[in-house]
């Protein structure tokens, strides 16, 4: 059975704007820009007959797709697609030391050390396991038009599953606020039609 899945990252928050680390442990709201990004996505894609909306358990994803939820589309929350936990970095504005810690962490992941993590945070391996659980659920669903709203690092992990790449390739994928990745599941494989598309934000 063919199904089309629209994956988007949530809209902008004040934490995004101010370059403060969010992660799974920070349940922030959208700012006005983020709300407008959500409205713009809705205006561009409200003609799609979505049968279900999946979000993470964090409210910034709920708020991004609220217009679809208000239309009465079935809505389900999955903590499996929450943002990764950045541990002791969450809620803090980036310092040179924090940035170096992050660079070192990504470097470890690129080398295949998927158990590396920020102190108190999640590893790539842990993120990958919960995202894999969500993706397997997605394959089994009967709906043919599906909307998913998730987070930046989670979206790069999802992209690895879509393209059957190892987790070290998360570095290859960009993720902007409300960037759309559109995928088709057919004949037991995914094909990608859009990556991080932002046409809905164009004037």
Image (tube, grey):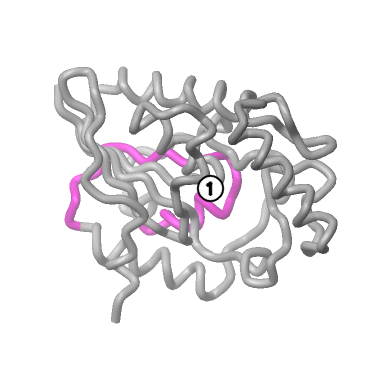
Magenta residue span: 47-67
Residue 21 within the segment the image draws in magenta = no
User: Is 5 positioned to the left or the right of 130 in the image?
Assistant: left
Secondary structure of the residue carrying numbered label 1? loop
Residue 166: image location, x then y, percent = 47, 27
User: Is 180 positioned to the left or the right of 101 in the image?
Assistant: left
Residue 56 within the segment the image draws in magenta = yes
Q: Residue at x 78, y 48 (%)?
A: 101
Is 203 rendered above or below residue 123?
below
Q: Residue at x 53, y 47 (%)?
A: 151
**Seen from this angle, which residue lies furthest front?**
111
In depth, the one of 56 and 200 nearer the eye is 200
Q: Quadrant of the N terminus?
A: top left
Is 134 rendered above or below residue 18?
above
Q: Label 1: how many residues lie within 10 Å, few (<14), some (14-19) or many (20+)?
A: many
| Displayed quadrant of residue 44 | bottom left
Q: Residue at x 63, y 71 (%)?
A: 17
| Displayed quadrant of residue 200 | bottom left
Label 1, on which residue? 151
Residue 143: image location, x then y, percent = 24, 29
- How many numbered marks does the figure carry? 1
User: Is 184 positioned to the left or the right of 84 in the image?
Assistant: left
Residue 188: image location, x then y, percent = 22, 18
Q: Residue at x 28, y 67 (%)?
A: 199
In depth, the one of 191 and 77 nearer the eye is 191
Q: Quadrant of the C terminus?
A: bottom left
| Displayed quadrant of residue 197 | bottom left
Residue 13: image location, x then y, percent = 60, 65
């Amino acid at each position: 059975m063919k199904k089309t899945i629209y994956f988007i990252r949530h809209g902008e928050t004040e934490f995004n704007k101010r370059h403060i680390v969010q992660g799974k442990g920070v349940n922030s709201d959208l700012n006005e820009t983020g709300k407008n990004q959500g409205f713009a996505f809705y205006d561009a894609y409200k003609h799609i007959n979505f049968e279900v909306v999946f979000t993470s358990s964090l409210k910034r994803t709920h708020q991004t797709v609220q217009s679809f939820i208000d239309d009465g589309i079935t809505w389900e929350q999955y903590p499996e697609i929450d943002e990764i936990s950045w541990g002791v970095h969450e809620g803090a504005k980036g310092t040179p030391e924090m940035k170096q810690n992050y660079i070192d962490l990504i470097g470890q992941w690129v080398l295949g050390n998927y158990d590396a993590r920020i102190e108190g945070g999640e590893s790539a391996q842990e993120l990958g396991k919960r995202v894999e659980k969500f993706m397997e659920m997605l394959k089994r669903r009967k709906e043919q038009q599906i909307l998913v709203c998730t987070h930046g690092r989670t979206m790069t992990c999802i992209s690895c599953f879509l393209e059957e790449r190892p987790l070290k390739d998360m570095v290859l994928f960009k993720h902007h606020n409300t960037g759309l990745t559109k995928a088709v599941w057919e004949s037991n494989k995914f094909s990608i039609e859009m990556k991080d598309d932002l046409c809905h934000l164009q004037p």
